[in-house]
Amino acid sequence: MSEPVKESLETSDGQKGSTAPAWIFALTLLFLFAGGVYFDHRSGWFDPQVYAPYHSSDELEAYQPKSGAAAMFAEGKKQYGMICAACHGDDGLGKPGQAPPLAGSEWVTTSSFKRVEEIPQLGLTGEVHVGGQAWSLQMAPMGAALSDSDLAAVLTYIRGSWGNKASAVSDTDVKAMRSLVAGHAPISGESGLNAIKE
Ligand code: HEC
């Protein structure tokens, strides 16, 4: 005759296997209940009026009132996005065959901004090296139509973004540059840039 099958919860030494005590269930239920009450009071039940109008913390940040340097930087970023990013990219890395990088560019990050500030004002044509790579394209005077303060903001933005750490450019700097170069032809490449007194 075969032995009777041992009760499944019995361990080899004949002890009853441990089952979770009832108080754990009671506590779990209590936590679930408390969580439900908390959710009910705080969540707004996903009502869009509670969560709107912002969809992300970036968006919220964009609407925060800014002043001084932060306002100028935000304006520069906006103008850059509307005008320059088409060729130089949102990441400032440029695009092969289209435009050289501004991130890490030796023309952008100079201590004096006398050269870089003329580029968007007059345009640039002919050979220029950026980070050891030669470019021989043409850039129209993409910043000539901007106000003094907007062009200053764009220049400040490109000199201070993507790891670039060069000083800001003010609207009075841009104004002075504009009266100095009024009527000048586009800058002719690297030699033209080097001819501008820093
Ligand atoms: C339509 C495309 C285009 C747009 C838009 C454009 N650029 Fe350029 N940019 C170029 C090209 C192409 C060159 C290289 C010209 C050459 O080879 O002589 C250049 C060169 C430069 C340079 C010098 C080289 C370097 O990489 O450091 C700077 C600085 C610059 N651009 C800034 C700007 C700024 C600021 C704006 C926006 C106001 C802008 N660009 C908009 C195409 C563009």
Image (cartoon, grey):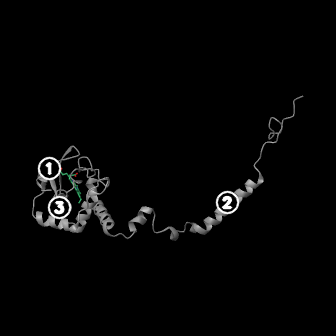
User: Which residue is rendered at x = 11% and y = 50% of the image?
Assistant: 191
Which of the two discs, 2 and 3, labels the residue nearer the N terminus? 2
User: For residue 67, which quarter of the picture?
Assistant: bottom left
Q: Quadrant of residue 161?
A: bottom left
Q: Residue 197 falls in which quadrant of the image?
A: bottom left
Check disc 2 and report its element: helix, strand or loop: helix
Instruction: Tell me the residue that label 3 is attached to.
Output: 121
The disc label shown at residue 173, or none = none
Drawn side of residue 21 relative to residue 77, left or right? right
Whether the residue carrying mark 3 lies under 8 Å from ligand 1 is answered with no
User: Which residue lies under the disc numbered 1?
Assistant: 190
* Real-space CA distance between mark 1 and mark 3, rounded to the nearest whole angstrom: 16 Å
Q: Mark 1 near ligand 1 (CB under 8 Å)?
A: no
Q: Which one is in front, 155 or 69?
A: 69
Residue appearing at x 42%, y 62% in the figure: 58
Q: Which residue is mark 2?
A: 32
Amino acid under label 3? Gln
Relative image position of residue 74 (x, y in whole percent)? 32, 64
Question: How many angstroms separate mark 2 from mark 3 (CA)?
Answer: 64 Å
Check disc 1 and report its element: helix, strand or loop: helix
Q: Type of residue at label 1?
A: Glu
Task: Pinpoint residue 7: horizontal percent, then vertical percent.
Answer: 83, 39
- How many circles with numbers are drawn on the protein? 3
**Label 2 CB sits under 8 Å from any ligand 1 atom:** no
**Dot 2 crowding, Cα within 10 Å, few <14, some 14–19, many 20+:** few
Q: Position of residue 115 (x, y in %)?
A: 17, 56
* Left or right of residue 189, residue 23 in this image: right
Q: Nearer the viewer, residue 195 or 5?
A: 195
Number of other residues with Cα within 10 Å of mark 3, as a class: few under 14, some 14 to 19, many 20 or more: many
Residue 174 higher or lower than 2, as above or below = below
